[in-house]
Image: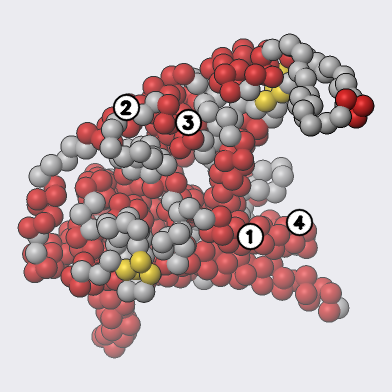
């Protein structure tokens, strides 16, 4: 009897553990991990990977303990594949990309490697003489001070070329490190899409709180002139903002949070609709219960928008503008959206106007000066160099995570000696994974966006439409910003994007009652 009771309660316990584990990651990665060493040390990756691994074990235990009847009751069977996983547009692209990275790590005979990636074969031939020759290889010559009687002749050894194998990745260790991190991002997406019991509204409010805290911290840093994160930790980068050592990475993160916050905000105003049959006491109680929360949400969004502009990240400002235009356009152009969340446009525009007034009070001189010149010759040249590198390794690339090790051969920009990333996530993806990997990711994202919009257009639920539209525009923001930066190589931002992808998909396929309960 006790075992049956435990079996019946464990799914809810597991969902709670997964939800709070996700919250832990979404709070810790932007607040703690990006500070000073957050983008270079393996302990950052280890925290993310171990937490995701633990949560997936909990999910697997839950999966094994629930019965087929209870499983079908918690989720529509049509949304589950034969392996028991949620069907999403990204399932197949994820499997294909994982397979590609594994293939980059598989040691291949020289002839096959030469056929698949001639320049990789040539690189090994230049660096490793054994790779391309069948000449005799002798052991280290004997030392002169040895007595003749003690000298021994070492047998001559040959290393046939056909027996030497090397992978497509020019630096397998770096590829493995990046691969495990990619698996952690995939794990986050998997957990969100396969855990129907998590409370999306609660997680979004936590995200808004974190975004507001980082934004407020950044504004204080800007006006106090500190060069330390939290006023305690020295930063090697003069453009720190909030808990991020680089203002562009802060802008990439907050650019995803702001549209998602707008999506939740418009659903709260829509839920305040009053009916003729309601008494005046019910109307007053409903208004008062939501009034303070709505005011706080508007203030939080105002602060985040203002902080993004004050950070002076040109890519972040432009990508936010793109996402907000898309947000308002979808509300305005869709008749169904106008009838269901018609207040959304007014709420969004009003909040943006309040943020503009707040910015005017803080001062916009430096912002206008920063936006007066949008050109970035150095980044453009690095992007062109990266594309040249990709042209030499067209199909499979140089290996995931190997950009910084091979780029010096192609760098034409003088001055900065070291470039760890291309400042263009698309160009770096092309050079790291080749045309095959680039097409897998691009087609997967395009198909995901298309499927999301089709379902959003058919939806009639205000909550579903608001959350989905907010998540979708957050994705648009980071995809736009990635043209001019490497946000997707920052663990906090990449992990948050994987969460938003999962959140958007389950939101557009769920009912508001499922998300609010």
Dot 4 surroundings within 10 Å: few (below 14), some, or many (20 or more)? few
Front one among 190 and 132: 132
- Label 1: which residue? 50
Which is more foreground, mark 2 or mark 4?
2
Q: Is residue 434 left or right of residue 135?
A: left
Q: CA distance from mark 4 to mark 3?
A: 51 Å
Q: Give the labeled residue for mark 2.
A: 412
N-terminal of the two: label 2 or label 4? Answer: 4
The answer to which of marks 4 and 3 sits earlier in the sequence is 4
**Which residue is pictured at 9% across the width and 50% down the height?**
369
The residue singled out by tag 4 in the image is: 68
Q: Which mark sits nearer the N-terminus, 4 or 1?
A: 1
Q: CA distance from mark 1 to mark 3?
A: 30 Å
Mark 3 and mark 1 in contact (Cβ < 8 Å)?
A: no
Looking at the image, residue 514 sits to the left or right of residue 480; the answer is right
Which image quadrant is residue 43 in?
bottom right
User: Does residue 499 lie above or below 121 as drawn?
Assistant: below
Name the image quarter holding residue 376.
Answer: top left
Q: First in sequence, mark 1 or 3: give its number.
A: 1
Residue 279 visible: no
Query: What distance separates the C-alpha of mark 2 from that of mark 1?
Result: 40 Å
- Distance from disc 4 to disc 1, alpha carbons, whole Å, reads 29 Å
Residue on which disc 3 sits: 406
Label 4 with label 3: CB-CB less than 8 Å: no
Above/below status of 124 relative to 513: above
**Disc 2 on helix, strand or loop?**
loop
Q: Looking at the image, is mark 1 or mark 3 nearer the viewer?
A: 3
């Amino acid at each position: 009897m006790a075992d049956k009771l435990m079996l019946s309660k464990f799914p809810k316990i597991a969902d709670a553990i997964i939800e709070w584990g996700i919250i832990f990651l979404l709070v810790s990665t932007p607040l703690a991990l990006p500070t000073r060493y957050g983008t270079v040390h393996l302990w950052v990756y280890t925290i993310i990977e171990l937490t995701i691994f633990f949560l997936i074990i909990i999910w697997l235990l839950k999966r094994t303990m629930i019965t087929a009847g209870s499983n079908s009751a918690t989720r529509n069977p049509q949304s589950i594949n034969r392996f028991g996983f949620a069907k999403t547009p990204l399932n197949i692209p994820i499997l294909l990309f994982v397979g590609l990275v594994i293939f980059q790590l598989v040691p291949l005979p020289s002839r096959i490697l030469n056929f698949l990636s001639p320049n990789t074969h040539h690189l090994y031939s230049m660096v490793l003489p054994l790779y391309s020759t069948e000449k005799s290889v002798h052991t280290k010559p004997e030392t002169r001070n040895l007595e003749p009687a003690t000298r021994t002749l070492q047998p001559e050894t040959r290393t046939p070329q056909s027996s030497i194998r090397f992978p497509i990745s020019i630096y397998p260790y770096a590829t493995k490190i990046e691969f495990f991190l990619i698996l952690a991002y995939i794990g986050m997406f998997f957990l969100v899409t396969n855990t129907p019991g998590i409370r999306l509204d609660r997680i979004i409010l936590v995200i808004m709180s974190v975004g507001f805290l980082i934004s407020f911290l950044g504004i204080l840093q800007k006006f106090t002139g500190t060069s330390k994160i939290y006023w305690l930790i020295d930063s090697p980068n003069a453009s720190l903002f909030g808990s991020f050592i680089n203002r562009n990475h802060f802008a990439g993160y907050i650019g995803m949070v702001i549209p998602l916050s707008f999506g939740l905000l418009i659903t709260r105003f829509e839920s305040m609709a009053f009916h003729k049959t309601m008494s005046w006491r019910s109307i007053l109680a409903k208004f008062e219960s939501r009034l303070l929360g709505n005011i706080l949400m508007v203030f939080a969004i105002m602060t985040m928008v203002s902080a993004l502009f004050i950070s002076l990240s040109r890519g972040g400002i432009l990508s936010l503008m793109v996402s907000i235009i898309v947000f308002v356009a979808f509300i305005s152009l869709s008749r169904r959206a106008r009838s269901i969340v018609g207040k959304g446009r007014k709420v969004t525009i009003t909040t943006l106007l309040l943020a503009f007034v707040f910015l005017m009070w803080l001062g916009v001189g430096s912002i206008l000066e920063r936006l007066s010149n949008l050109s970035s010759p150095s980044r453009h040249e690095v992007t062109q160099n990266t594309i040249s590198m990709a042209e030499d390794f067209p199909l499979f690339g140089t290996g995931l995570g190997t950009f910084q090790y091979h780029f010096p051969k192609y760098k034409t920009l003088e001055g900065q000696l070291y470039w760890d990333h291309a400042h263009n996530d698309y160009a770096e993806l092309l050079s790291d994974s080749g045309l095959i990997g680039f097409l897998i990711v691009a087609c997967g994202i395009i198909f995901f966006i298309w499927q999301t919009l089709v379902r959003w257009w058919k939806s009639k639920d205000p909550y579903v439409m608001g959350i989905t539209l907010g998540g979708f525009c957050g994705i648009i923001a980071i995809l736009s910003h990635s043209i001019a930066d490497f946000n997707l190589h920052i663990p906090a931002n990449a992990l948050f994007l994987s969460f938003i992808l999962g959140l958007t998909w389950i939101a557009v396929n769920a009912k508001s009652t499922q998300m609010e309960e």
